[in-house]
Amino acid sequence: MRKQCNIVILCGANPCKGPGIMALNIFEEFSKDGHIVKIISNQHFESTIKEIISIGKIEKFFIRFKPSLVFNKLMKMIYHRRKHSKYSMFSLDFQKKNLYANYILRNIHEPPDVFILVFSHFFVSVSDLKKIYNKTKAPILFWLADSAAFTGGCHFTWDCKGYMN
């Protein structure tokens, strides 16, 4: 008999529509195999499935509104040292911040066996992932849906030059 795993899917897209449906498909397949699965998303949406957790609009505002972030944005506007965050896996504003780690950790009741990260853009930062790993010691797998992680943000390689910025 196979071991039942506790899996948490972190999704930066709405798992009920668009590209986020891939997270829902992963959820359904692992659930069918008898695993305990939960999706946590930073997108606001309504779901009747209790294992799919959405950050509410008000809570999202308070998670993202931090005086240091406001200061950093003002400094970037003044000095024009902004990179093209459109072409980075983790946007410039999120590279060094723990924004969502505490919210994610509050919404898991026991450390999972594994985290699966789908569509990380504007959700978890490297700093968030480090904090989550240090607290849970659970491996974090990146489920790469397209070429964005390798091209610097372009979904398909074709004539993409995003990685050059």
Image (tube, rainbow, N blue to C red):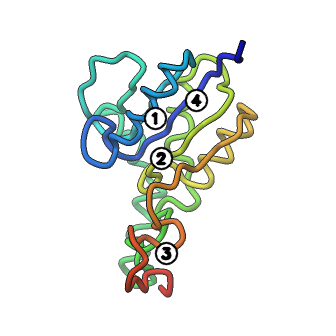
Q: Where is residue 80 in the image (x, y as percent from the top left)?
A: 40, 84
x 55%, y 15%: residue: 34
Question: Any mark on residue 26, and which?
Answer: 1
- Relative to 164, is 49 on the left or the right? left
Q: What is the total number of numbered labels drawn onto the structure image?
A: 4
Q: Nearer the viewer, residue 34 or 69?
A: 34
- Residue wearing tag 4: 105
Secondary structure, mark 4, is helix
- Relative to 144, is 139 on the left or the right? right
Secondary structure, mark 1, is helix
Answer yes or no: do the residues labelled 2 and 3 have beta carbons within 8 Å? no
Q: Relative to 85, does residue 112 appear above or below in the rendering? A: above
- Residue wearing tag 2: 118
- Residue wearing tag 3: 151
| Quarter of the rendering containing residue 158 | bottom left
Query: Furthest-front residue in view?
Result: 1
Q: Nearer the viewer, mark 4 or mark 1?
A: 1
Say whether disc 1 or disc 2 marks the residue closer to the N-terminus. 1
Say whether disc 2 or disc 4 marks the residue closer to the N-terminus. 4
Question: Does residue 61 appear in this view?
Answer: no
Q: Where is residue 42 in the image (x, y as percent from the top left)?
A: 38, 40
Residues packed near mark 2 inside 10 Å, few (<14), some (14 to 19) or many (20 plus): many
Amino acid type, callout 4: Leu
Amino acid type, callout 2: Val
